[in-house]
Amino acid sequence: MATLYLILLTLHNLTRWLVLIAGVWALLVSVRGIGGARPFTPADRRPVALFAGSVHLQVVLGLLLFGLLGATAGRAFSDAPRASFQWEHLGLMLVAAVFATLASALSRRAASNQAGFRVAALWSGLALVVILVGIPWWRPLLRLFS
Ligand code: HEM
């Protein structure tokens, strides 16, 4: 169980960087399109979809970690500061996942190119802010099974 936890924690740690890179890429591409005459193409949609997909993967890994902590009772819930971090982290990241999903889903259905860029920029930006706030920056920046 401890080994599985460490494998998932390592994946969760590294996927964080994929989430952040995809989020910044999605934001840059969509902000660049606002105010211009460019069409909202599949190439513009790609980083927005990658951002939402990587956040969903991170949510799955996070929920597994959370479940394992619960299953190995005591690790999570006997330690008050750690338990409160985990509930805050869970809440913030679920909100971020909804925002990243809205960025991808609403921009795909937008009535015009401009609306597509605007909606993608708004929801990706909000998701990114919530993620930056929710990441426990005091924990290792890169973890490799340790
Ligand atoms: C975009 C979404 C998320 C990002 C970027 C993120 C990022 C992180 C990072 C960087 C860590 C520290 C990893 C380490 O210590 O090596 C962490 C820990 C953790 N995260 Fe997430 N996370 C996300 C979503 C979630 C979700 C939805 C849950 C669900 C509960 C979750 C549960 C956890 C747990 C249980 C830990 C380990 C805490 C511990 O061992 O004390 N995460 N997260």
Image (cartoon, grey):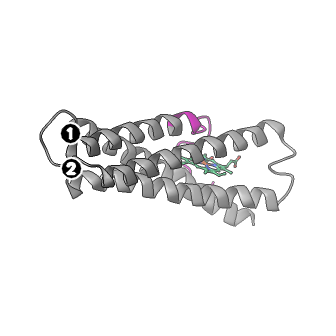
Q: Is residue 135 magenta?
A: yes
Which residue is identified by label 2? 40
Between the C-alphas of marks 2 and 1, the distance is 8 Å
Q: Amino acid at mark 1?
A: Gly
Q: Amino acid at mark 2?
A: Phe
Q: Nearer the viewer, residue 9 or 116?
A: 116
Q: Nearer the viewer, residue 6 or 22?
A: 22
Quadrant, the N terminus? bottom right
Q: Residue 108 lies in what quarter of the image?
A: bottom left
Q: Residue at x 15, y 48 (%)?
A: 39
The label shown at residue 68 is none
Q: Residue at x 54, y 55 (%)?
A: 58
The label shown at residue 33 is 1
Mark 1 neighbour class, 10 Å CA radius: few under 14, some 14 to 19, many 20 or more: many
Q: Residue 85 lies in what quarter of the image?
A: top right
Which residue is outermost to the left?
Answer: 37
| Residue 144 in sight here | no
Magenta region: 132-146
Left or right: 37 as drawn, with respect to 97: left
| Residue 118 in sight here | yes
Q: Is residue 77 magenta?
A: no
Q: Are marks 2 and 1 in contact (CB under 8 Å)?
A: yes
